[in-house]
């Protein structure tokens, strides 16, 4: 199989944080798309506010940049990886 859809490791806890991260990433990507449609340069301004950059650094940027994605494929690949391996990591290390 080319794309994994799960693992054989049994889970001992309900997966909560992984699903929250997936939902948050998809929601932030939707906001990125909407901001780009509403105004010229809206997406660029949003990314400048949230993305991790060496200039104009803000205290929240090390956290918010992790939720930004460049394209549908980038989002899909990251969410697939999180969906497959996130529950096991969350189960092993806790929420």
Image (cartoon, grey):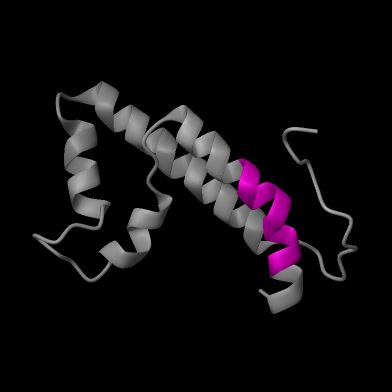
In the image, 27: left or right of 79?
left
Q: 7 or 66: which is nearer to us?
A: 7
Write down the region rendered in magenta: 80-89
In the image, 3: left or right of 70?
right
State whether residue 2 is above or below residue 47: above
Q: Residue at x 18, y 57 (%)?
A: 53
- Image x and y of residue 1, in percent: 80, 33
Q: Residue at x 86, y 65 (%)?
A: 11
Confirm whether the magenta stretch covers residue 83.
yes
State whether residue 7 is above or below residue 94: above
The quarter of the picture where residue 88 lies is: bottom right
Could you tell me how many numbered marks the image carries? 0
Dividing the image into 4 quarters, which one contains the C terminus?
Answer: bottom right
Report the residue that reaches farthest toward the front. Answer: 1
The quarter of the picture where residue 35 lies is: top left
State whether residue 56 is above or below residue 5: below
Q: 61 or 53: which is nearer to us?
A: 53
Confirm whether the magenta stretch covers residue 91.
no
User: Principal SS element in the magenta part?
Assistant: helix
- Image x and y of residue 68, in percent: 37, 46
Q: Residue at x 31, y 66 (%)?
A: 62
Report the residue that reaches farthest toward the bottom. Answer: 93
- Image x and y of residue 26, in percent: 51, 40
- Image x and y of residue 80, in percent: 64, 42
Q: Residue at x 69, y 77 (%)?
A: 93
């Amino acid at each position: 199989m080319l794309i994994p859809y799960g693992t054989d490791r049994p889970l001992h806890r309900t997966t909560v944080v992984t699903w929250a991260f997936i939902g948050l990433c998809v929601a932030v990507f939707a906001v990125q798309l909407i901001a780009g449609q509403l105004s010229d340069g809206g997406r660029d301004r949003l990314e400048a506010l949230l993305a991790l950059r060496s200039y104009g650094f803000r205290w929240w940027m090390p956290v918010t940049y992790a939720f930004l994605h460049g394209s549908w494929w980038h989002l899909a690949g990251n969410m697939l990886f999180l969906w497959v391996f996130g529950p096991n990591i969350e189960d092993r290390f806790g929420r």
